[in-house]
């Protein structure tokens, strides 16, 4: 990446999160970039049939973007396709939109998170290749929470600081962490110490740990969304009902 003038950025690794029409022939592009976080760009003339940008501004494809300008909305100047990745299909496409929605709803603009960009790129790559996606999705969700300042305490009990023990069961208290279960908390609301310790190490080696991680991430993300609804989750649930 290099700057060639005031407000100009070139060669920035990026993904398109969302586009929508702007004026008669242009697009507003919400992009996730490695070194500038989420940025809003005007792609002038991108809806014209002969626009060079028209076929390149696709979600889930690694791109290199360049832009210029000041203020909240910059002008997209260059798009290069880095290629070599299949298009997302069927369920993988919905999971990709789910990740994009989380970034759009939870990330501030122009707040760089290179580690989150890497986790996103790895998850999209796994989805594109049809590889088992649950581990990379859980890793992305966990990295998202950590990078946004909602890092998880998983290996020590809230309050006492005692190490979490693999053979015991815990409730996860929002904003605090694991609390050893008493008799009043139901099994469905609990997590095994073994699962919490594995999640802390990004070790998703078996189905039970993946299932408990999914349950924990769903609870945490619902909390931090603060009532915002995810369209991708609603569509996914409707398809499952069908």
Image (cartoon, rainbow, N blue to C red):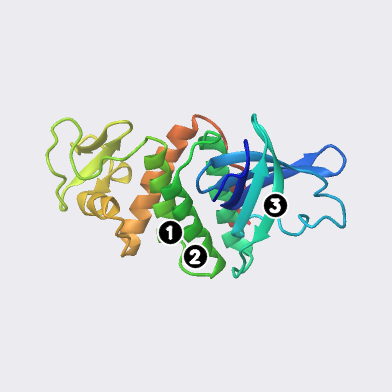
SS of the residue under disc 3: strand
Instruction: Answer with left or right where residue 220 lies relative to residue 69.
Output: left
Seen at 70% across and 45% down, the residue is 76
Seen at 46% across and 37% down, the residue is 222
Seen at 62% across and 57% down, the residue is 63
Q: Position of residue 70 (x, y in %)?
A: 65, 31
3 vs 1, front mark: 3
Mark 3 surroundings: few (<14), some (14-19) or many (≥20) residues within 10 A: some
Q: Give the residue pinned by disc 1.
A: 136
Proximity of marks 2 and 1: CB atoms separated by less than 8 Å:
yes
Instruction: Answer with left or right where residue 225 lies relative to residue 58.
Output: left
Q: Judge whether residue 98 can be spotted in this image.
A: yes
Disc 3 and disc 2: Cα gap in Å? 27 Å
Q: Give the residue pinned by disc 2.
A: 126
Proximity of marks 3 and 2: CB atoms separated by less than 8 Å:
no
SS of the residue under disc 2: helix
Q: Position of residue 177 (x, y in %)?
A: 26, 36
Disc 2 and disc 1: Cα gap in Å? 7 Å
Disc 3 and disc 1: Cα gap in Å? 30 Å
Q: Judge whether residue 238 can be spotted in this image.
A: no
Question: In which quarter of the view is residue 85 placed?
Answer: bottom right
SS of the residue under disc 1: helix
Q: Is residue 227 above or below residue 142?
A: above
Q: Give the residue pinned by disc 3.
A: 78
Mark 1 surroundings: few (<14), some (14-19) or many (≥20) residues within 10 A: many
Earlier sequence position, callout 2 versus callout 1: 2
Q: Position of residue 72 (x, y in %)?
A: 64, 30
Q: Of 137 and 56, which appears nearest the observer?
A: 56
The tag on residue 17 is: none
């Amino acid at each position: 990446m290099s700057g060639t003038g005031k407000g100009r950025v070139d060669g920035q690794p990026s993904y398109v999160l969302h586009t929508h029409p702007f004026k008669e022939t242009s697009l507003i592009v919400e992009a996730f970039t490695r070194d500038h976080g989420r940025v809003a760009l005007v792609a002038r003339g991108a809806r014209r049939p002969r626009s060079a940008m028209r076929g390149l501004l696709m979600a889930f494809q690694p791109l290199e973007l360049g832009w210029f300008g000041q203020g909240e909305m910059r002008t997209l100047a260059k798009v290069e396709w880095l290629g070599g990745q299949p298009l997302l299909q069927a369920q993988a496409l919905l999971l990709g939109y789910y990740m994009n929605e989380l970034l759009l709803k939870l990330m501030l603009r122009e707040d760089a998170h290179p580690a989150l960009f890497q986790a996103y790129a790895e998850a999209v790559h796994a989805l594109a290749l049809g590889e088992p996606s649950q581990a990379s999705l859980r890793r992305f969700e966990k990295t998202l929470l950590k990078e946004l300042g909602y890092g998880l305490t998983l290996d020590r009990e809230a309050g006492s600081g005692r190490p979490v023990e693999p053979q015991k069961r815990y409730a996860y208290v929002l904003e605090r962490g694991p609390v050893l279960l008493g008799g009043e908390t139901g099994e469905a609301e609990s997590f095994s110490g073994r699962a919490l310790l594995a999640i802390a190490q990004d070790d998703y080696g078996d189905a039970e740990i993946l299932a408990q991680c999914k349950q924990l991430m769903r609870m945490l993300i619902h909390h931090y969304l603060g009532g915002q609804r995810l369209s991708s989750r609603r569509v996914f649930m409707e398809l499952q009902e069908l």
